[in-house]
Amino acid sequence: MATKRNASKWNVSRLPDLTGRTAVVTGANSGIGLAAADALAGAGAHVVFAVRDPQRGRTAAGTVRGSTEVRRLDLADLASVREFAQEWGDRPLDLLINNAGVMMLPEQRTKDGFEMQFGTNHLGHFALTNLLLPYVTDRVVTVSSGAHRFGAGVIDFDDLNLTKGYTPVRAYAQSKLANLLFTLELQRRLTETGSRVRALAAHPGYAATNLQSHAANPVSRAAMQLGNKFFAQDDKAGALPTLYAAVMDLPGASFVGPDGLGEMRGAPTLVGRSAAASDPGAARQLWAASEELTGMSFPPPLPLTDAARA
């Protein structure tokens, strides 16, 4: 495993040759998703842009050198998630990068009635991962955030949609905490079944992307725009933890982030998480609740997966 000292020197030029490998990147049309897709394609991978707006996805894919394709995926609509998985068929998939997300929105609902941030950032990716998992041959990387520590700092299992106390920050924090608990429980289940597939999480630190432009509070929106201009690292630097988690030999359930002050910027390395994000009981409870809400469950391994790993 890489040491922190070595990790501090890691950058996109150290990606291995990914020729012959396939990666799905959700939300690849902009920000760190596009930066990650560009880097993976540049290293030889075939990258699938899983995006809500195919036209924007095609425009983004056109800026990338390498092998790409664009497929529609709306994580705020479980019917769209099912359709994406059905169209995928039984193709082997080396890397599933759960990157797409929404941040600090005004209160609203997904097409299935879930709070938008929890429904998109967690439940959509939960459903997608379970549907594609039989075909995954290497790893699942889910993008979380240091903001998982914000708000109450725990999952409100009595009110997952936060109908009794919604704030944009609280909802975002809960969704990012859910990403980490999902990764923890997914890795436990993979290990229990003897799978070699690994589940990891990453966070970009403070990266300038268009996520900050959708904040519900105009004062917060203006402050984040100033932060983007003067303090944030760019989307290419923000994508490095995701890429590091996608290709480096790291233990399952690892969390990767920047190594700088406050994990706001810097080179990728292993980072810590809150006690709530390390709670196996909460991880199992969230998994059970997510299965009930989405109708998806952890799939049995398929022979194809074993053959692809051999």
Image: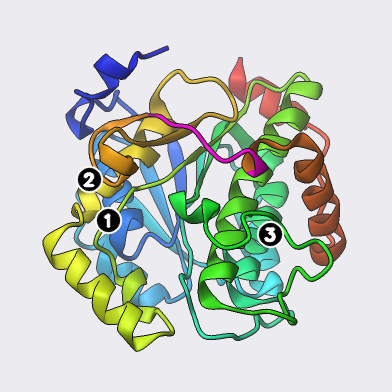
In the visual, does 96 lie left or right of 264?
Answer: right
Task: Please provide percent x and percent y for residue 105.
Answer: 49, 80
- Tell me where the magenta segment starts and ends, as one range: 270-276
| Pointers 2 and 1 in contact (C-beta within 8 Å) | yes
Q: Distance between the residues labelled 2 and 1?
A: 7 Å
Q: To which quarter of the image does residue 22 belong?
A: top left
**Mark identifier at residue 207:** 1
Judged from this view, the residue extending furthest toward the left is 230
Q: Mark 2 points at which residue?
A: 237
Which one is earlier in the sequence, the residue at label 2 or at label 1?
1
Sort mark 2 into few (<14), some (14-19) or many (20+) by Cα contacts within 10 Å. many
Name which residue lies at 24% across and 54% down: 235
Sort mark 1 into few (<14), some (14-19) or many (20+) by Cα contacts within 10 Å. many
Label 1 secondary element: loop
Q: To which quarter of the image does residue 190 belong?
A: top right
Q: Mark 3 points at which residue?
A: 86
Name which residue lies at 34% across and 52% down: 68
Q: What residue type is labelled 3?
A: Gln
